[in-house]
Image: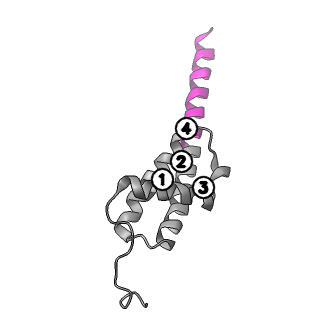
Amino acid sequence: MTALAALALTGCDAAQQIAGEAVEGEIRNAVTMQCQEVAQGAGFVAGRVAEVCRCSADTFMADENLTLDDVSRERIEGIVNGCAESTAGQTWNTVPAEENGG
């Protein structure tokens, strides 16, 4: 193999790595956005949303078979519920009903 061919292969590997990282970032962002909607809609206190969504994105990304097409509200709800339990702490909004418009 010539030096030029080796350099070209190295460039391809780097380009594939960069593209892969970009796709992973796009998937992570989609999961995080969907998680924030689910968590806020379920009444999670603001301080817990980031923690639960970080766990949810990590959990989703750990399954190498999942793609951007697999980011759905139903799938993310299940992951959010699991992360809320596994990260413990205060999960639900505990503002008294009369202060929360109830």
Looking at the picture, does residue 88 appear above or below residue 90?
above
Q: Which residue is mark 2?
A: 60
Could you say which quadrant of the image residue 84 lies in? bottom left
Which quadrant: the C terminus?
bottom left
How are the residues colored?
A: one colour
Q: Are marks 2 and 3 in contact (CB under 8 Å)?
A: yes
Mark 3 Cα-neighbour bin, 10 Å: few <14, some 14–19, many ≥20: some
The CA distance from mark 2 to mark 1 is 6 Å
Which residue is found at the position 56% from the left and 23% from the top? 10
Nearer the observer, disc 3 or disc 4?
3
Of the pair 63 and 24, the residue shown nearer to us: 63
The CA distance from mark 1 to mark 3 is 10 Å
The CA distance from mark 3 to mark 4 is 27 Å
Please give the range of residues in magenta. 1-21
Q: Which residue is mark 3?
A: 75
| Residue type, numbered disc 4 | Ile
Of the pair 17 and 71, the residue shown nearer to us: 71
Could you say which quadrant of the image residue 48 lies in? bottom left
| Residue type, numbered disc 2 | Phe
